[in-house]
Image (spheres, rainbow, N blue to C red):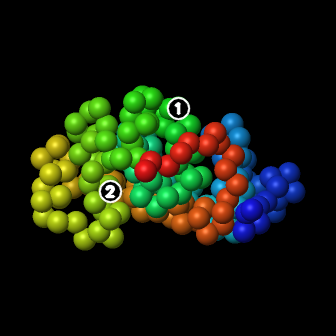
Amino acid sequence: MARLSTVDPATAAPDARRLLAKVESALGATPNMMRAMAVSPAVLDGYLSFGGALAKGSLSGALREQIALVSAAENACEYCYAAHHVLGARAGVSDEDLASGGHAEASDPKVAAALRFARAVLRTKGFVSDTELADVRAAGYDDGQIGEIIGAVALNVFTNYFNSVGRTEVDFPLVALPA
């Protein structure tokens, strides 16, 4: 049972209605997470702004979705794991990579290096080793891209925690978290 209230887009206050309309336009639906965030338009706006800024970076949408899967798996966020399977498929992530993403694995070695680094950031709370940083650089990521990986991790930790605290009702097809 959800522990945070949600906003009905039809009856939302003007700021929340505007933001939810933006979500509906982009996704073709208004997920429960966004409806819960819209209780405070500042929260939803912050989430959308940060995500929008990262989308202008150099990391592909597919890679950002795979990082989201790693974060959801590491934080045991059922909502986000289900959501990012759908969004990852829309972004072009293969079925194989969707299935292995929660384990920080990918068919492309460069993508796999980014996912391992993202997992290291999560597991060490940012205190990655010199070797972990050297490995992601050796895979071909520059400092700007490394910053974007860290940004994607941070954005997804926010949504993982938001949905875990709120016990947001999953409105995507359920996908079992990796063991």
Q: Please give left or right for residue 75 compared with residue 32 in the image.
A: left
Q: Please give left or right for residue 161 compared with residue 129 in the image.
A: right
- The vertical placement of 171 against 7, above or below, is above
Residue lying at the far right in this picture: please name it: 11
Residue at (17, 58) in percent of width and height: 133
Residue at (19, 50) in percent of width and height: 136
Q: Position of residue 83 (x, y in %)?
A: 57, 45
> Disc 1 versus disc 2: distance between alpha carbons?
23 Å
**Is residue 151 in view from this perspective?**
yes
Q: Position of residue 155 (x, y in %)?
A: 46, 59
- Residue type at mark 1: give it: Arg
Give whichever of 33, 175 is nearer the camera.
175
Residue mark closest to the camera, 1 vs 2: 2
Image-quadrant location for residue 94: top left
- The vertical placement of 91 against 47, above or below, is above
- Which residue is under mark 2? 119
- The vertical placement of 103 against 131, above or below, is above
Residue at (82, 55) in percent of width and height: 8
- Which residue is under mark 1? 90
Mark 1 crowd level (few <14, some 14–19, many ≥20, 10 Å Cα): few
Give whichever of 48, 81 is nearer the camera.
81
Q: Secondary structure at mark 1?
A: helix
Of mark 1 and mark 2, the one earlier in the sequence is: 1
Q: Secondary structure at mark 2?
A: helix
